[in-house]
Image (cartoon, rainbow, N blue to C red):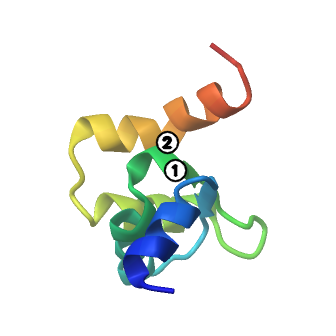
């Protein structure tokens, strides 16, 4: 299976961003895109502020940040 095939298959799944490592976040952004990512923290093991700081360090555009921080969850769970 090629990376392109894998990326296509993974775009059918929604993932949470729980890694405090910006490089891991960047990898998932490149693999599945911001519309398939949710903000998450693995609290109490990792404080939400640590994950948010790592996410902000990526300097994403405001639309992608809003998608990851709340819009994707609102859509996924029909909260709109």
Q: Give the answer, above or below, for where 55 lies relative to 76.
A: below
Occupied quadrant, residue 21:
bottom left
Mark 1 Cα-neighbour bin, 10 Å: few <14, some 14–19, many ≥20: many
Q: Give the answer, above or below, for where 3 lies relative to 80.
A: below
* Secondary element at tag 1: helix
* Secondary element at tag 2: helix
Q: Residue furthest bottom?
A: 1
Q: Which residue is identified by label 2?
A: 69
Percent position (x, y) of residue 22? Answer: 37, 76
**Residue 28 visible, this orientation:** no
Return the residue nearer the eye: 20 or 73: 73
Compare marks 1 and 2 and give the one earlier in the sequence: 1
Q: How many marks?
A: 2
Mark 2 Cα-neighbour bin, 10 Å: few <14, some 14–19, many ≥20: some
Percent position (x, y) of residue 29? Answer: 38, 64
Left or right of 11, for residue 57: left
Tell me whether circle 1 and circle 2 mark residues in contact (CB < 8 Å). no
Q: Residue 36: which numbered mark, if any?
A: 1
Q: Residue at x 40, y 69 (%)?
A: 31
Which quarter of the image is occupied by the C terminus?
top right
**Residue 57 visible, this orientation:** yes
Q: Residue at x 67, y 33 (%)?
A: 76
Q: Give the answer, above or below, for where 39 lies relative to 27.
A: above
Q: Nearer the viewer, mark 1 or mark 2?
A: 1
Percent position (x, y) of residue 73? Answer: 63, 36
Q: Residue 67: which numbered mark, if any?
A: none
Percent position (x, y) of residue 3? Answer: 41, 82
Occupied quadrant, residue 13:
bottom right
Left or right of 22, for residue 13: right
């Amino acid at each position: 299976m090629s990376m392109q095939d894998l990326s296509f298959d993974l775009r059918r799944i929604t993932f949470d961003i729980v890694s405090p490592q910006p490089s891991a976040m960047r990898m998932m952004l490149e693999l599945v895109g911001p519309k398939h990512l949710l903000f998450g923290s693995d609290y109490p093991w990792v404080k939400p502020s640590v994950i948010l700081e790592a996410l902000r360090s990526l300097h994403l555009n405001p639309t992608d940040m809003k998608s990851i921080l709340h819009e994707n969850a609102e859509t996924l769970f029909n909260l709109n």
